[in-house]
Image (cartoon, coloured by chain):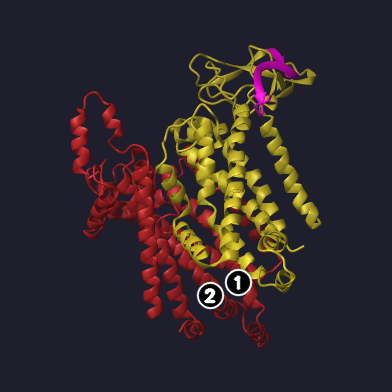
Amino acid sequence: MGYLLRRVLHGVVVLVAVSILSFLLLHLAPGDFFAEMRLSPQIAPGTVDALRAQYGLDQSLPVQYGLWLRSVSKGEFGYSFAYNQPVSALLWPRVRNTLLLNTVALVIAWLLAVALGTWAAARPGKWEDRLCAVASSALLVIPDLMLALALLMLAVRTRWFPAGGMVAIDFTDLSACSKVKDLGAHLFLPATVIVLGTFPLLYRHVRSSVSESLALPFVQAARGYGIRRNQLLFRQALPAAANPLVSLLGLSFGTLLSASLLVEVVLGWPGLGPMLLESILARDVYVVIAVVLLSAALVIFGSLFADILLYWSDPRIRTDAR
Amino acid sequence: MTRVQKIAVPLAALIAVHLLVVFAGFVGPYDAATQFREHPYAPPSRIRFRDESGHFHTRPFVYAWKNNGDFAEYMEDTGRIMPIRFFVHGEEYTMAHILQSSVHLFGVEEPAHIFLLGSDGYGRDQFSRLLFGGQISLFSGLLAAALALSLGLLCGSAGGYLGGLLDALLMRTSEVFLVLPWLYLLFAVRAFLPLRMSPAGTFLLLIAIIGAVGWTRPARLVRGIVLSTKERNYVLAARGFGATEWYLLRRHVLPQTRGVLLTQAAILIPQFILAEVTLSFLGLGVAEPVPSWGNMLSALQQYNVLSSYWWMIIPGLALIPIFLSYYLLARSLEQPV
C-alpha cells in the first residue's frame, strides 16, 4: 500500500512539473490569443486590453498559474478564449470520442496480436510464421500518416466507407440500430489505421515471449505428457508469457488518449487531436495545457495500472515488492 | 548474407538517395518553385519508345500534355514527338550553396514539359519538388538525430559517470519528457514558437525542437552503459594505475556506447524524418513555396485531390523504402557480431 501511495505521489509531482513547464513555455511565447485582434482597425486597443484583463493575461506569471490552479480545483481547467467557455466543457465530448476510437482499435489490435502471435510462436520457421514476420515488418516501416492517407484515398475513390467525420449528417434522425451501424461505418477507417499501426509492435512482443515460454521445462514436460496443443498454448505457455505483456498492456492503456492524434486530424474524427491542433494554431493556451496534461496523466496512470495488474496476476512479484 | 553485407546494402541505398537529393538541382529538370500555370495537376508523363504509327525510336520521348481549357482532362498531343535529351541547359541553380550551373540531367524542349511524377496544383514538377523536398525532410531527420544523440551522450554520460544530484536531476527531467506522448510534446514545443518564420529559420527550428524533444531515450541508454562500465575491472585497474577521470571516460567508458548510439541513430532518424513530415503536413513546419515531403502531402487534405490526383501521394510512398532501409540497418546493427 505504501508503495502504491508513493507511486501516486510521484505521478502527481511529475504532472505538476509538466503543468509548470507547459505553462512557462506557452506564456513565454511571443504573442497571445488577442495579438491578432490588435491588428484589426475595427477593434479599439482599449477593448483588447480589457479582454486581456478579463482573462487575467495582464497579471504576472505566478499569479496566472495560481488562477489556473484555482480553476483546475473547480474542475474547469482554465478558460478557452476561442470558445469563451470553461475548457472542461469543451474537453469531455472530445475525450469521449477519442476514447471510443482508441478503445475499439486497441482491443482489436490486442486480440489480433495475441491470437496471431501465439499461433506463429507455435509454428516457428513455418510459412505462417514467416508470413506474419514479413507482414509485421512491412507494417512497421509504413508510417501511420501514409496508412491514413492511403486508406482515405481508397475510401474516397471506392466509396466503400465514409471518408472522414464520425457520424452522417442525418445522424440524429436515425433509429438506434442504424445509428450504431453508421457509427461503426465511420469508425472503420480510423480504427483500421490505428490497428495496423499498433499491431506490429504488439505482435512481436507476444510472439517472442510466447516462444520463450514454450521452451520452458514445465511446458516441455506438459508437452511430453501429451497435452493437446491448444491447451498447451493457451493454458500453459500464454500465462507464463504474460508478465511482459501485462506491462505492455499498461503502456497501451496509457496511449488511449494520444495514439489517435494524427489519425483523427487526417480523417476528421472529432476527438482531442483536431482540437489540440486548432488551439495550438490559435494560441488558445489553456486548451493546449489541458489536453497535454490529460494525456500525460493517462500515461502515468497507465504504467501504474500495469504495475497493479502485475502485482495482482503474479504472486512472485508480491513478495519481491514488499 | 554476412553481417557486413547486411549493413552495407541498406547503407548504400540510403547514401544513394541522399546523393540524389543533394544534387536535386542537377537531377531534377526544373526548379522547385517554377510554375507552369497552364498545367495544374498534370498526370505523370508517359515515357515512350514507340509512337502512334508504331515506329520504334531509340531515344525515349514524351508527348506534351494538352487540355481543352478546363484543366479537368489532359490528353497527349500526339502530333509532335518531344525527345528526352540528357545534360540539357535549363534553369540556373546552385548546389549546396556553392556550385552554380544550368545543366540538368534530362529534360525536353518547350513547349512540352516532362513531369515524371506529375505536377501539383500550381503546375510545379513533382519529381523536382520531391528531390528538393528531400533536402528538407531527410536532412532535418539526420541533423535532429545528430543533435538528439549528442545531447543524449552528453547528459547520459555526465549523469552516469558523475552521479549524485546532477544524475537525479537529469533523470527526473527525462521522466517529464517520457510521460508526454511524443507527438503531443512536439506540438506543445512547436506551439510556443512563432508560427510564421523564414524557411531556413523554420528548418533550423524544427531540427532544434525535434532534437531537444528526442534526447531522453539515448540519454537513458547511455547512462545505463556508463553506469555498468565504470565498475568494470579494467576500468578500476586503469584508475589504479593513475589514469585521470577524463582519460577513463574517453578511453574506456565512452567507446562502449558506440554500438547503442549507432543503433539508436538508425531507429531515431526515420522517426525524426516522420516528425518533420508530420509537422509540415499539419502546417506547423516548413511553409510553401519551399517544398518538404510533409507540405507536399498536405495537398491531400483537399477532397478533389484525394479523388482525382493519385500522384500527389508519392512523397508519402517515397518514405517507405527509406524507412525500410533504416529498419534493415537498425536490425543488422542490433545483431551481435
Label 1 packing within 10 angstroms: few (<14), some (14-19), many (20+): many
Do residues under tags 1 and 2 come within 8 Å of each other at their CB atoms? yes
Is residue B260 magenta-colored?
Answer: no
Magenta: main secondary structure: strand
Q: B242 and A322: which one is in front?
A: B242
Secondary structure under the numbered disc 2 in the rendered image: helix
Residue shown at 22% from the left, 57% from the top: A70
Location of residue A277 in the rendering, given as x and y in whole percent from the top left corner: 39, 43
Magenta stretch in the rendered image: B80-98
Name the chain letter of the residue that bears numbered label 2: A
Task: Give the quarter of the image for residue B19.
Answer: top right
Picture layout, residue B149 above or below residue A208:
above
Amino acid type, residue under disc 1 in the picture: Ser
For image coordinates 72% across by 63% down, the residue present is B252
Residue annotated with mark 2? A243
Mark 2 Cα within 10 Å, few/some/many (few <14, many 20+)?
Answer: some
Q: Which residue is mark 1?
A: A209
